[in-house]
Image (cartoon, rainbow, N blue to C red):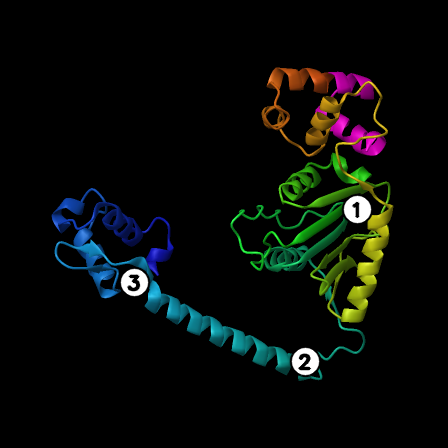
């Protein structure tokens, strides 16, 4: 459907008519190269009426397309469930043991991970260890006006435990920064975790076949087995150290502002962003970070992050 593309002539012309009202076709040459042809399509699909052409209300114009899409989605879902039952009943694919699927390729794991990120509703629990396995990019935080029942909305509680040794990885820092942007997200650190683990909505768990391994990964959907993984996560969560401004083991000559800045440094923020958060100037932030590097005996920002997460958090 041409209107689904942000750059289509149809969408550009429809937006123009919404913004500018009824406009003769000859005055639309600066909007699209062939206004008559584009207007014919918009009229045929109910988006434009009258002469000079004017835009119909979007809610009314989109009803047929939305209805067709909903019908197609219903058919696809029915077909998928039908084939899923057929698959389960087939002797060639019937599981001989516990309901656990193996994901053997990076592509499979990434696809499942991405799907879970976009469908999580209530709980996201994750243990992150080395060797780090980069997967789908982290999702953006939810907008404040999203419903509590919306997928991944404010009702979703995200808890993540990081093994300190992985904090020097830039991809890990990007994930940490993205997680911190979620309202109510909680992060903890620990020296060592037994294995990678992700649990979503107490319904699906991902973990390696071999502890602290990479591929293959197990996707667990059996309620009793998932419950066991939840208990495992909670045990590690209780032992881990919360990530917060109170860095109790940091040197005593770090004042509260230093500690607040250090938290944002570990989160991967820029000096300019830290200055806004801490109500300071970028130059002052830079001086304080340089002093903390000297205290830690390191020369780079990355080394400071690694040192702080290992010794001060």
At 82% from the left and 18% from the top, the residue drawn is 253
Predominant secondary structure in magenta? helix
86 with respect to 221 (left or right):
left
Could one spot residue 15 in this view of the protein? yes
Q: Which residues are magenta?
A: 291-313
Q: Secondary structure at mark 1?
A: loop
Is residue 10 part of the magenta span, yes or no?
no
Q: Secondary structure at mark 3?
A: helix
At 32% from the left and 51% from the top, the residue drawn is 8
52 in relation to 177, above or below: below
* Alpha carbon distance from label 3 to label 2: 42 Å
User: Which residue has dot 1 on it?
Assistant: 129
Q: Secondary structure at mark 2?
A: helix
User: Which residue has dot 3 on it?
Assistant: 61
Mark 3 or mark 2: name the one nearer the start of the chain.
Answer: 3
Mark 1 or mark 2: name the one nearer the start of the chain.
Answer: 2
* Alpha carbon distance from label 3 to label 1: 51 Å
Tell me the mark number nearer the camera, choosing from 3 and 1. 3
User: Which residue has dot 2 on it?
Assistant: 88
Is residue 311 part of the magenta span, yes or no?
yes
């Amino acid at each position: 459907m041409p209107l689904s593309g942000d750059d289509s002539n149809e969408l550009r012309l429809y937006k123009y008519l919404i913004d500018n009202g009824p406009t003769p076709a000859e005055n639309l040459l600066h909007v699209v190269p062939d206004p008559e042809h584009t207007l014919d399509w918009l009229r045929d699909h109910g988006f434009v009426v009258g002469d000079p052409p004017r835009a119909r209300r979007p809610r009314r114009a989109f009803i047929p397309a939305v209805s067709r899409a909903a019908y197609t989605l219903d058919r696809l879902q029915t077909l998928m469930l039908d084939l899923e039952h057929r698959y389960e009943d087939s002797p060639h694919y019937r599981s001989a043991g516990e309901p656990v699927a193996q994901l053997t390729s990076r592509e499979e794991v990434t696809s499942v991970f991405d799907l879970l990120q976009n469908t999580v509703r209530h709980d996201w629990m994750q243990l992150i260890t080395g060797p780090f396995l980069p997967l789908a990019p982290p999702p953006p935080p939810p907008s404040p006006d999203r419903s509590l029942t919306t997928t991944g909305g404010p009702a979703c509680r995200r808890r993540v435990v990081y093994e300190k040794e992985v904090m020097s990885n830039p991809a890990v820092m990007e994930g940490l920064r993205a997680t911190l942007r979620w309202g109510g997200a909680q992060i903890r650190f620990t020296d060592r975790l037994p294995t990678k683990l992700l649990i979503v909505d107490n319904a699906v768990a991902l973990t390696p076949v071999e502890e602290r391994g990479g591929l293959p990964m197990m996707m667990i959907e059996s309620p009793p087995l998932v419950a066991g993984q939840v208990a495992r996560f909670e045990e590690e969560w209780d032992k881990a150290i919360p990530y917060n401004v109170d860095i109790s083991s940091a040197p005593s000559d770090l004042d509260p502002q230093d500690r607040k800045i250090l938290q944002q440094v570990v989160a991967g923020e820029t000096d300019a962003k830290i200055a806004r958060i801490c109500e300071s100037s970028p130059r002052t932030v830079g001086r304080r970070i340089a002093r903390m590097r000297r205290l830690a005996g390191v020369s780079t920002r990355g080394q400071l992050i690694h040192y702080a997460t290992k010794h001060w958090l």
